[in-house]
Image (cartoon, grey):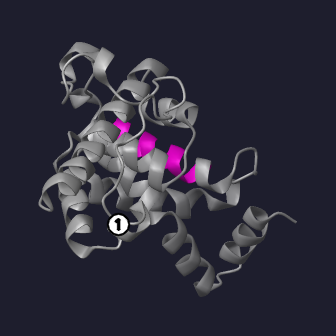
Amino acid sequence: MSNDAHLVERLLSGDPTAYKELVGTYQSAMRAVAYTIAGSRHADDVVQDAWLSVVRNLAGFQGRSSLKTWLLTITANSAKSRYRQNRREILLEDVPSPHGTIGDERFSTEDGHWLLAPFAWHQDTPEALLTENELRQCLERTLQNLPEFQKGVLLLRERQGLELQEICELLELSLSNVRVLLHRARLKVFATLEHFEETGKC
């Protein structure tokens, strides 16, 4: 029996620890989807609606997709149906680049890898720098200030580990749009790192 099937079996049997495990594992990913589609103001309501739908439909989960994909699809559908009239379309020309033209960006739009590696760090390792509380606060501030779709795509890719195609399907965006949003979000995070390394400040 797969882990998903075992967890669903525990949920259907009324195991309270299974519900705690389910929420603890998937709540942040569901909120990231809700945030991206519905905006920060409505994300919590969307997630609450999604959880109600999950509880009602749990017995119908057939394991054709992973439990995570099923939960995120329910969340996306909840957000889309509730706010369909306000659905936003992303046009590439409407997404500003923080560093000018596409040609001077530092990541590949194909795979997200560095085109140009960052300059040498003054400290021993990037890991040492990342342990500094001030830098973590700077990065968190940068993340919070990203446009909603950039932030959402970055969270879904980097924190939740979703593949680009999964993000496309959940958010109903083209692959090129998702790549651009992710690319620009990563550039802003990189700019924060670079500025902190040069100045020691946000």
Q: Residue at x 43, y 42 (%)?
A: 76
- Quarter placement of the C terminus: bottom left
Say if the magenta span includes residue 166.
Answer: no
Q: Residue at x 65, y 84 (%)?
A: 15
Where in the figure is residue 142, as x and y percent of width and height?
20, 52
- Quarter placement of the N terminus: bottom right
Q: Residue furthest right?
A: 1
Where in the figure is residue 30, as x and y percent of width and height?
44, 55
Q: Is residue 72 left or right of residue 8?
A: left
Q: Is residue 93 left or right of residue 185?
A: left
Question: Callout 1: helix, strand or loop?
Answer: helix
Q: Residue at x 69, y 54 (%)?
A: 61
Q: In this rendering, is residue 72 above or below 77?
A: below
Neighbours of disc 1 within 10 Å: few (<14), some (14-19), many (20+): few
From where the camera sits, is residue 147 visible? yes
Q: Give the amino acid at mark 1.
A: Leu
From where the camera sits, is residue 41 visible? no
Where in the figure is residue 129, as x and y percent of width and height?
33, 66
Q: In this rendering, is residue 76 above or below 16?
A: above
- Tag count in the figure? 1
Residue on which disc 1 sits: 130
Which stretch did the figure color magenta?
A: 70-82
Q: Quadrant of residue 188?
A: top left
